[in-house]
Amino acid sequence: MSAIHLQNLVKKFGDFTALKTMDLAIADGEFMALLGPSGCGKSTTMNMIAGMEEPTSGKILFGERDMAGVPMGRRGVGFVFQNYAIFTHMSVRQNLAYGPKMRGAPKAEIDRRVGAIAEMLQLTPLLDRKADRLSVNILQRVAIGRSAIMEPAIFLLDEPLSNVDAAFRAVMRTELKQLQRQFRQTMVYVTHDQLEAMTMADRIAVMDHGVLQQVGTPLEVYNNPANIFVARFIGAPGMNLLRGRPAESDRGLVIDLGALGVTPPLPAEIADAVRGAPGDVLYGFRPEQVTLAEGGRGLSLPVTFVERIGARTIVHLGQGESAVKAVFDNDVGLAIGQTAVVAPAQASVRVFDAATGLAMKAGG
Amino acid sequence: MSPVSATISGDASILEDNSDAARARPVLPDEGSRLGFRLTLPAQILVLFIAVFPLLMQLYISLTDWSPLSGHGWWSAWSLWNNFANYTDLAADARFWSALKRTAIVMIVCVPAEFLLGLALATLFADEFPGKRIFYSILLMPMMVVPAVAGYMFFMLFQSGGPVNDILSALSGFPVTIAWLSDPTLALIAVMVADIWQWTPLMFLILLAGLVGVPEDQIKAATLLGANPWQRFVTIVLPKMKTIIIIALAIRVIENFKIFDTFYIMTGGGPGVATETISVYIYKLTTQDLIWGYVAAIALAILIVLSIAAVFAMKRMARAREVPA
C-alpha cells in the first residue's frame, strides 16, 4: 500500500497542454476518483501514474519514492483497462498466473497464489475456461485478480464500467467497491460518470481542460462546489445559476436578478463574502432543493418542459439566461405554459463570482 | 394488372424473407433457396467450366498417350488408352522425383527464410521511425517486379563478371570470378536468393497486418505485469498472430511449389537439371517432349499433394481460431 503525491505535474503533447500543473495527494488506502468530461486530462494523469507516459514536468511520488524513470513494469501498479485487456488466447488460470510466471516465480508458488486469488474472487470453478467468452463481470474479476496477484501498492482503473450496459453497472459498482474493501489498496479510478464517482469514491478530483477544479468527498463537491464548472458538472441536472447583482435591502443582502425580481436575503456567511463584490454574481441553487411557493415569494417563471422519470419529475422553467430546472419527488401537476413560483431552500443557496467563476464564501 | 403486381409483391416478400432468414436461420425456406439457386446459376456454370471441366479433361488425358501431334482431338484420346502407364511411369521417373525433392528443398529453405525476415521487418515497422514511409515503399517493390524481370535481373547479377562477384572482390581484396549459374550447388543458392528477395515483402506485408492487429492494451497489460519485450512477443504477440502466420506460410508453400518464372529465366533448370523444379520439368515436358498425357498425370499428382497440404493448413487454422485467439 502506498500514498500517491502528484507535484506540479504537467503534460504537453506538442502544442497541446493535456494537463496544467496538477497537485494532488492521494492517501494510503484511499479510493480516489478522477472525474471530468472527455479530454479533461484524467486519463493522461492516470497513464503518467502508471508510467505509460512521461510527465513533461513535475513529480510523481509513491510514498516517499520518486517514480521518474521507473518503467511501468516495476512500479508495482495494478492497472484495469477500459475493456479489461484480458489475454483472450489464454485460460482464466493462465491470465491470473501471467504476472508471477513472467517474473519467474516457482510453479508451486504460482499455483498457490492463483488458487488463493481465484478463491477470493470466486473464480475457482472458471479457472480452466478460455477467457474469450466470459461475461463482463467475470472479465472484471479476472482483470482485477490478474493485477491483484502481483500485490500492487496501487490500483488504477480506467473507466472499467463504460462498456457495461446501464442495468448491469449498479451490480458492477457494488462488486468493485467490495473488492476494494477486501484489498484495501490505494485506488485511482478514472471516470466521466459522476454516479460512479459519487457512489464509490472516498474523494473525488474534478477535472476540466487539464485543470484540477476541486478535490473533496462526494458530498463536499456536491454541496460546496468550488466554482461554476463543478456546480454545473456535479448533479443531474447540475446547479441552477442565475446572473444578478448584489443589492442591500432592509432585510439584508439580496441579489437583484433583473426581470426575475429580487432573491430572498442571503444566508449570513455568504452575504459577508458577497457584500461589496464589484461585478455581477451568479446565484446558485440545486434543482433538488426547490419548493413550489404557491402565491408566495419566489422566482416566477413559465414552465417550458416537464420530464417525468417515475420517481422524480424534472420541471424546466424559463429560457436562456433565466433557465431554471426544478426536481420534485412527485408529479406536481405543472403543465407546459403554466407559470410556477419556485423558491430555493435558503441553506442550499451558493453564490459565485460571475467574472472568475469561483464560489464566494466567508474566508474563501 | 393484378397478376403483375402480385408477382412483384410476391418476389419482394421472398427477398425480405431471405434477408431475415440469413440472419435468423441457417436453412433458407424452399422458395428462397430455389430463387437463390436460379440467381447464382450463371456463376455456377462459369465455375464449372473454369474449374471442373479442365480437371476432368486433365484426368481423361492423363489416362492416355495423347499428344497434340497424335493426329486427332483430345476428345477422342480414348483410342490411345494406355492402362495407367503414365502413372506407373511417374512412379519410376527419377527425374520427376529429384525435381520434387529439389522443389521441397527450395521450399524448406525459402519459406522459413522469408518468414523470419518478414517477421523481423514487420516487428521493426510496427514502431515509428524516421523515413518509415519511404523504406516501406522500397521494401514492397520487389514484390511488384514481374517475376520474369526479376529472373533477368538476378541472371545478370550472378554472371561471373557481374555485380555480385564485383562486390565480393571489393570486400575480399581478391578478384572473385565465381561462375554462380554454372555450378549445380551455387546455381540453386542463386535462384533461392532471388526467390527470397522477391517474396519476403509479401510475408512482411501479411505479418505486419497481423502484428498491427494485436491489441495494444493487452501488450500494455503484459508490460505492467512485468513481462519483458521477448516475453511479450512470445506470450502475447505470436499467439495472437497464429492464424495469420498459418495463412502466410500456406500461401508461400503453395506458391513455392509452383515456382517457375525466375528459375526458368535464370538457369533454365540447369546446369543439367540442378535447378529443375517441378514446374520447370513440367514446362519442358509440355513444350519440348510434347507428351501431354504424362504431363497431365504429373500435374494431377501434384494437385492432389497440394490439396492435402491445403486441407491440413486449413484445419490447423480453424483450430487456431477456435481454441486460443
Image (cartoon, coloured by chain):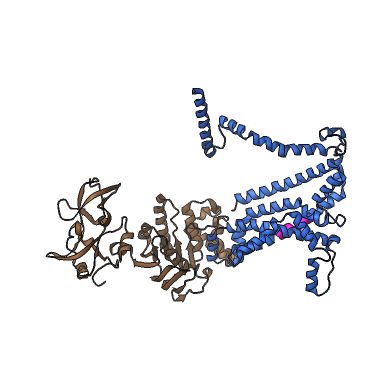
Quarter of the view holding residue A158: bottom left
Q: Give residue B141's position: percent from left, percent from top.
A: 68, 59
Q: Tell me if B318 is positioned left or right of B226 in this view.
A: right
Colour of chain B in the rendered structure image: blue
B186, above or below B38, in the image: below
User: Is-magenta flag for residue A126?
Assistant: no
| Nearer-the-camera pick, B125 or A35 | B125
| Segment colored magenta | B105-114
A106, above or below B205, in the image: below
- As drawn, the chain in brown is A
Q: Give residue A323's position: percent from left, percent from top.
A: 26, 55
| Nearer-the-camera pick, B35 or B149 | B149
B12, above or below A336, in the image: above
Quarter of the view holding residue B142: bottom right
The residue drawn where x is 80% and y is 74% is: B172
Q: Give residue A73's position: percent from left, percent from top.
A: 53, 68
